Image (spheres, rainbow, N blue to C red):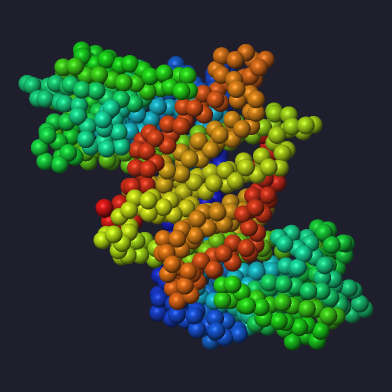
């Protein structure tokens, strides 16, 4: 048991922090939020060169073969600069599923070009009615002679507006809420019958609204066995939640640091407002929540690699819940302490606030994770 | 970063678990199952059992009688103690004055005091607060005037927890009124049982038990050789000790035990045809607090891990007391809520009215309102975070 960064991890953290400072600060995000793609393919290629897009993947596929924790450390630093390149969608969600379920051929075709930074990916799972229930899927995959026909609609697809290939969760068997009968298909962005509408998000990032109107895919586009995708999707979404906690940690730390600096600098009644005990105690409580976020973020990143499903669920739910509740306390307090200027678009703090609220809504909110936690068998195992 | 336990560590856990199961006397086990508050006799009995095994001071360096365990083993050991519900040992000797003497004491003081802290032969208490020096501790007024080889003490301490059971007291006193109030304070060790002029009077707490006391000093003589650190240099020691205390008094382990207790009460409380533990709303309330406890447990592990590497507790340790005691109280509040009408009962209610496993809940619920007050109130903790960590300006 050891919670210190290794020397390699420290070097990694330092280099990503330097990257954010020199090449991808909030000003860059402000420019990118004005363009439809919302991120820069050249920067994506650079991230590929740095090896960041291959961290959790096997070396034989061009990856680094490292653990999820290393990816979390990168995301945390990127969160401090609101870096919009789609690592969460492309590496964590879609990339994770490809490396877990993909055949050699599929990995070579879809994953490796992404690791190199030449392509980006997305995972389409959420639907209008599904909320956070991963079983709830109306999109259908109908068997036809040589392959499958996909019909339905997917919403809030992270990087769905820009991805070269989209992994689509569809129902190949059973009915709307069944746990079995789900399958995953890799669909090209330009496939006939597929239409993608970019949707502007609150946080200045885009997602895709995807319509599948009789999209034809062959068997070579089916990821893993048919009808049994649910545990894998759950696994990917859990890693998405752990990644959201990591990115959120960077955002929340940045927001907190800026708030503390402001408390020292802003004068009212002839003194810095940070000398008022009411504000000091608010800041101390923010600090406590921030440290709890950090602790659970580490826990979640470690458990993201765990094959013990109950452990993984318990700790990732604890982390996502802490980000949603404790993180919310920090972000909302930050805006309050900045006063009116915190509600203006010109001030960066509001951008962090928005991104954090989006991360809160992704992969299950506080209520969802309390609910999942209390349903774990170990919860009610009273001795 | 790595959180997994090695096969050796897992074997160690098994060893500890089996040993505890064999070492706990039957009555102690029964009380543990009922969540009873252990009395002084039971606590000292368990102290001696651990001492005989050589496991009394996991946090001490091996050369002073500690176990020499690494942080993982210490964590596992603590985890297993909580799981079994063994009595919580008094922190004043093992957790506070012992480590302080190891750091600041003379060789003679170490030889004189450490062995009996380990054996339980001498029980300690803490003399910090005074009626007019609570949160403003540095304004303390217990006078210590030099006379020959002694200090002569006059004044009063309060909230001296378990002074009624203690043989010795470590205390802060005023040896000078020159300069800043922090600069005239010294740290003394006094023989509570054998020093004429010291009187102890326990308070009855709202929990119905006697936990803390008032302690009076009237011309009580303490040898100068019982001073730890330099004269008028006690404030530094006091702060070091408070820092040490903060990492321990959040009640993180105790909260773990309460969590099991809350679920046990809920499981045994009918709710229609099922139990309260099947009630969706109540389950979610427990789950939310359990997750928060999990988060703090992880923060505690990070602190332990840093200490293992020889560093002072990091900033994360300052929240252990603040958040820990709020969780601790939250657990007792959940237990009270779980009891429904049984929350009307008290320590002497008949078993037909109040089941044995609920008997201590109301008492502890009341007493533990002190948790956010003792060891530096949580408001003082927030001041410390604001000043020492966030470096916010003073008014």
x, y percentage for residue B364? 51, 26
The residue lying furthest to the front in this view is: A269
B132 above or below A149? above
Quadrant in the picture for residue B158: top left
Residue A326 seen in render: yes
Q: Is residue B189 left or right of residue B224?
A: right
Seen in the picture, residue A39 relative to A293 is either above or below; the reply is: below
Q: Vertically, is B324 above or below A337?
A: above
Image position of B258 with respect to A35: above or below:
above
Quarter of the image that includes the C terminus of chain A: top right
Q: Give the residue at x 54% y 50%.
A: B4
In the rendered image, residue B213, in percent from the top left (x then y), is placed at 34, 21
Q: Which residue extends farthest left?
A: B148
Q: Is residue A109 visible?
A: no
- Left or right: where does residue A105 sit relative to residue B61? right
- Position of B341 compared to B376: left or right? right
Q: How many marks?
A: 0
Q: Residue at 56% x, 34% y: name it.
A: B333
Relative horizontal placement of residue B1, taking residue B131 as reference (left or right): right
Query: How far from the left and from the top, in percent, is residue A375?
Result: 70, 46
Q: Residue at x 46, y 27 (%)?
A: B367
Nearest the viewer among A340 and B58 is: A340
Residue A30 in the image: x percent, y percent?
A: 49, 80
State the image quarter where residue B11 is shown: top right
For the point 56% across and 72% down, the residue is A203
């Amino acid at each position: 048991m050891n919670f210190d960064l290794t020397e390699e991890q420290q070097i990694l953290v330092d280099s990503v922090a330097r990257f954010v400072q020199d090449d991808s600060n909030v000003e860059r995000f402000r420019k990118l939020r004005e363009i439809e793609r919302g991120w820069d393919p050249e920067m994506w290629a650079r991230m590929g060169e740095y090896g960041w897009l291959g961290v959790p993947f096997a070396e034989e596929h061009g990856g680094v073969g490292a653990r999820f924790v290393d990816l979390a450390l990168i995301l945390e630093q990127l969160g401090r600069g609101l870096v919009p390149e789609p690592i969460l969608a492309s590496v964590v969600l879609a990339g994770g599923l490809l490396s877990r379920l993909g055949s050699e051929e599929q990995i070579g075709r879809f994953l490796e070009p992404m690791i190199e930074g030449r392509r980006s990916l997305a995972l389409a799972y959420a639907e209008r009615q599904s909320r956070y229930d991963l079983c709830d899927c109306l999109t259908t995959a109908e068997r036809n002679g040589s392959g499958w026909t996909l019909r339905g609609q997917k919403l809030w697809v992270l990087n769905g507006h820009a991805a070269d290939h989209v992994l689509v969760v569809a129902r190949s068997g059973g009915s709307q809420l069944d746990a079995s009968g789900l399958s995953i298909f890799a669909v090209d962005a330009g496939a006939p019958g597929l239409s993608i509408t970019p949707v502007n998000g609150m946080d200045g990032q885009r997602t895709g609204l995807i319509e599948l109107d009789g999209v034809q895919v062959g068997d070579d586009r089916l990821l893993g066995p048919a009808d049994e995708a649910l545990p894998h999707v759950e696994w990917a979404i859990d890693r998405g939640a752990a990644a959201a906690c990591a990115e959120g940690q960077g955002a929340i730390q940045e927001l907190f640091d800026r708030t503390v600096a402001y408390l020292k600098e802003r004068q009212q009644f002839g003194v810095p407002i940070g000398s008022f005990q009411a504000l000091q105690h608010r800041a101390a409580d923010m600090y406590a929540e921030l440290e709890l976020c950090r602790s659970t973020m580490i826990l979640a990143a470690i458990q993201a690699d765990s094959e013990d499903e109950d452990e993984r669920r318990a700790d990732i739910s604890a982390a996502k819940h802490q980000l949603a509740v404790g993180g919310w306390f920090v972000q909302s307090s930050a805006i309050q302490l900045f006063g009116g200027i915190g509600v203006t678009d010109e001030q960066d703090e509001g951008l962090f606030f928005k991104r954090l609220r989006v991360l809160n809504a992704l992969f299950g909110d506080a209520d969802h994770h309390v609910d999942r936690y209390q349903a774990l068998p170990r919860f009610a195992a009273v001795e | 970063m790595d959180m997994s336990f090695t096969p050796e560590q897992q074997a160690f856990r098994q060893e500890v678990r089996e040993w505890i199961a064999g070492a706990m006397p039957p009555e102690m086990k029964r009380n543990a199952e009922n969540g009873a508050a252990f009395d002084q006799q039971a606590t000292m009995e368990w102290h001696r059992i651990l001492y005989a095994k050589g496991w009394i001071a996991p946090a001490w360096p091996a050369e002073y009688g500690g176990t020499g365990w690494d942080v993982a083993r210490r964590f596992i050991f603590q985890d297993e103690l909580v799981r079994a519900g063994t009595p919580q040992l008094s922190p004043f000797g093992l957790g506070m004055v012992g480590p302080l003497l190891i750091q600041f004491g003379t060789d003679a003081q170490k030889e004189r005091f450490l062995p009996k802290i380990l054996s339980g032969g001498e029980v300690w208490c803490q003399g910090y607060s005074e009626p007019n020096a609570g949160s403003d501790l540095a304004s303390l007024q217990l006078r210590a005037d030099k006379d020959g080889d002694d200090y002569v003490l006059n004044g009063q301490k309060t909230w001296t927890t378990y002074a009624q059971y203690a043989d010795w007291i470590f205390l802060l006193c005023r040896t000078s009124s020159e300069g800043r109030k922090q600069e005239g304070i010294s740290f003394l060790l006094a023989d509570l049982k054998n020093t004429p002029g010291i009187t102890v009077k326990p308070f009855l707490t709202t929990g119905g038990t006697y936990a803390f006391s008032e302690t009076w000093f009237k011309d009580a003589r303490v040898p100068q050789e019982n001073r730890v650190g330099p004269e008028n240099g006690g404030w530094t020691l006091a702060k070091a000790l408070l820092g040490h205390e903060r990492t321990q008094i959040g009640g993180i382990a105790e909260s773990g035990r309460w969590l099991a207790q809350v679920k046990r009460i809920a499981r045994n409380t009918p709710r229609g045809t099922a139990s309260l533990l099947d009630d969706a709303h109540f389950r979610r309330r427990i789950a939310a607090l359990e997750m928060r406890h999990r988060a703090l447990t992880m923060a505690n592990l990070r602190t332990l891990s840093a200490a293992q590497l020889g560093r002072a507790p990091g900033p994360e340790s300052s929240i252990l007391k603040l958040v820990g005691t709020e969780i601790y109280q939250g657990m007792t509040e959940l237990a009270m809520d779980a009891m429904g009408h049984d929350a009307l009962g008290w320590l002497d209610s008949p078993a037909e009215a109040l089941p044995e496993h609920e008997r201590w809940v109301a008492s502890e619920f009341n007493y533990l309102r002190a948790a956010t007050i003792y060891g530096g109130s949580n408001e003082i903790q927030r001041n410390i975070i604001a000043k020492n960590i966030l470096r916010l300006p003073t008014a």
